[in-house]
Amino acid sequence: MVPRVPDPIEIRPMRGDDVPAVHQAGVAAFEDLDRRSGVPYPGPAPPLEVAHARYHHLLATDPGGAWVAERNDSEIVGASVGLVREGIWGLSYLVVIPGAQSAGTGRELLSRAWEHGRDARGWIVLSSQDPRALRAYARLGLALHPCLMATGTPRGISAPAGVRPGSVDDLPLTESVDRAVRGAAHGADLRVQVESGATLLVVPGRGYATVRDGNVLLLAALDDAAARDLLLAALASAGGGPAMVDCISAAQGWAVAPCLDAGLELRPSGALFLGGDLGPFTPYVPNGAYL
């Protein structure tokens, strides 16, 4: 029997009409990873409209960082997106579908997204537990920070009095906090989160968080006390449903007690890879899409 020659794969810039296929590639890749990793409580795929808003937004802001891997001139088998905000580069997305992995496609996609941040002064990558992903990101020369996640149904907590609902009018506060904590503001990325249904929580003058369906999407504060209050308020917003806090690195020790007090379980997660001028990067819970 003659061995089958793999179909050639082309790496090309992402287009707007690729977005549905890019989303489906991510769903397939992460569902497969959850199965292989034995994740006991895999999170749901992001809502279609939220995912599409994300990709269209990043295509508009960072077209040079958005790439797809295409097979047979029609099938999207992978994608990567790198973004740059005020000189800080982050890897927003990198997936390859099952069946097309371990053949160099992910490496090529990562190379294109990484090139978009060539002139950056800081770099952020959030990695899954996939050994291949960890290996690829470690080879970028960034510092490795293992992480935990907290999951479960919060109980016995309430939102502290100092936390209030926020709005797009609070974006200047988020930008000043971001610059102090992570070296660059998220800017319009946060507006997209809020307009896509995330709840913005604010401690005036000290910090903010975004949360959706009990999942803490992003949290940044100028001090640990404000960060703890924001985290408790975010967990209380789950309203008796499940919640998740991911990317809890050793630098985020302030987050452990509120999670345990709320009855959440800690388990190993992926890792953060950080480099360059990122500020203290604490108190901070990064976001997988917007870093």
Image: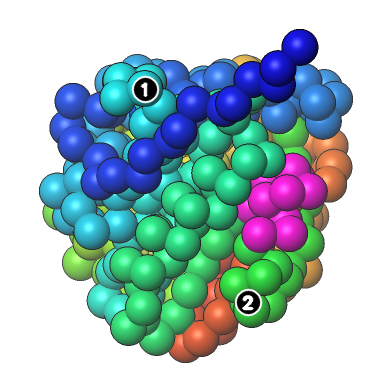
Dividing the picture into quadrants, the one containing residue 21 is: top left
Observer-nearest residue: 110 or 169? Answer: 110
Please give the name of the residue rendered at 17% of the width and 32% of the height, measured from the top-left corner: 16
Say which element carries label 2.
loop
Where residue 253 sits: x, y (%)? 75, 66
**Callout 1 secondary element:** loop
Say which mark, if any, is on residue 142.
Answer: 2
Q: Position of residue 3 (x, y in %)?
A: 70, 21
Quadrant for the N terminus, please.
top right
What residue is at 67 percent from the left and 70 percent from the top? 139
Residue under label 1, please give it: 72
- Of 224 and 45, nearer the camera is 45
> Image quarter for residue 70?
top left
What mark, if any, has residue 28 been given in the picture? none
Identify the mark nearer the N-term, 1 or 2. Answer: 1
Residue 72 is covered by the magenta coloring: no
Q: Quadrant of residue 15?
A: top left
What is the three-letter code of the residue carrying label 2?
Answer: Leu
Measured Cα–Cα span from mark 1 to mark 2: 35 Å
Specify start and end residues of the magenta stretch as a single range.
127-136
On the rendered structure, is 202 left or right of 250? left
